[in-house]
Image (cartoon, rainbow, N blue to C red):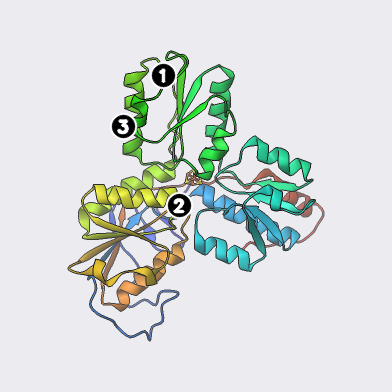
Amino acid sequence: MEDSLSRCACGIRRNPTAPVTPFGAPGTLVPGVSSSSPTTSAGPSRVLLAAPRGYCAGVDRAVEAVEHALDLHGAPIYVRKEIVHNKHVVDELEKRGAIFVDQETEVPEGERVVFSAHGVAPSVHANAKTRNLTTIDATCPLVTKVHVEAKKFAADGYTIVLIGHEGHEEVEGTTGEAPENIVLVQTEDEVETLEVEDPDRVAYITQTTLSVDETTSIINALKRKFPNITGPKTDDICYATTNRQQAVKALAKECDLVLVIGSTNSSNSVRLVEVAREHGVDSHLIDFHHEVDEAWLEGVETVGITSGASAPEDLVEDLVGFFRERGATDVSELNTVEEDVRFMLPSEIRKELSARSEGGTELPVVG
Ligand code: SF4
């Protein structure tokens, strides 16, 4: 557990009992933004950052798993799918020697492969075994929890309604646990037309990165249609998704525009844009600060910034720097909840690190 006061990656203090805290000092040079950049046309005078934002424990663990694998074994390390849904993170790991592939069948026999934070179906593990691959499973423990629920409900003979987005890797992985039992539902309308074998033997589970409000509506529709439906003991939508949505709702009340740092294939980042818009504020998703469109800034006095669970903090700092260069002097954080969740590294990495430590080999430092 951390103290009630903690520091984010950029060293600023976060205090949950004092909701708005200053972010850096006016004129502070922000990484990635040159101090000599010419000041362009006027921008918002106030920048408000959501807290919490950015990296979650599952993303942190997955990225560290690839970094450790590269340090322990050297390049190349194969990674099935994007380790997390962020272009910048993937580019940086590629520079260090990670090779991203779409399927495990593309990995040369006998090589080492990391499975992404979104999880994989059992058939992927089976394929990897057939190809004699050494696997490192970086599936987020909160996704694994949903896989376990799917297996349990399937073993008990339930039809499982999976609330999620078609084609998302997490949904594909979860569905693979019980393909005969799982039916995907994406909207409340789809609940109305849903037919199941036994309406008294239905269970639901959800993708971890959905809109909390929208999912509640779908679950309520399921409960109306199947009064005996059962579900997980605790929510499947993860703490990071829930907290970031709560933070963006608070941000929307204070801002004329909310910018979300994240990639278009990042489900939780896209949801943040939707939540901000639903709460009455213009909002856009960007990977980098140079994607800000001048037209968005017209008449904007306060701009809010948040970032998806797979977006690194330095991209946020770049965006803050962009607005400072344009004259923003009031930069602060709006704290809604304190997070202190950490996950252990995947067991394959822990075993390797421990074996090297016992053998007296100097451990690499992950940077
Ligand atoms: Fe895990 Fe949630 Fe992060 Fe996904 S967003 S990696 S489920 S903590």
> Which label's residue is closer to the chain start, 1 or 2?
1
Residue at point 68%, 56% (across, down): 78
Label 2 is placed on what type of residue? Ser
Q: Quadrant of the C terminus?
A: bottom right
Of residues 16 and 121, the one nearer the viewer is 121
> Which label's residue is closer to the chain start, 1 or 3?
3
Expressed as whole percent of the image width and height from the top left, the position of residue 242 reads 38, 42
Residue at point 61%, 41% (across, down): 120
Residue 191, compared with residue 157, is above or below; it is below
Residue 361, compared with residue 80, is above or below; it is below
Disc 2: which residue: 266
Alpha carbon distance from label 1 to label 2: 30 Å
Label 1 is placed on what type of residue? Ile
Alpha carbon distance from label 2 to label 3: 22 Å
SS at mark 2 in the image: loop
Disc 3: which residue: 217
User: In the image, is the residue at mark 1 within 8 Å of ligand 1 by its beta carbon?
Assistant: no
Of residues 33 and 115, the one nearer the viewer is 115
Q: Position of 221 compared to 59: left or right? A: left
Disc 3 packing (10 Å; few <14; some 14–19; many ≥20):
few
Disc 1 packing (10 Å; few <14; some 14–19; many ≥20):
many
Alpha carbon distance from label 1 to label 3: 15 Å
Disc 1: which residue: 229
Label 3 is placed on what type of residue? Ser
Q: Position of 139 compared to 76: left or right? A: left
Expressed as whole percent of the image width and height from the top left, the position of residue 37 reads 36, 84
Q: In the image, which disc is placed on residue 214?
A: none
SS at mark 1 in the image: loop
Residue 31, compared with residue 108, is above or below; it is below
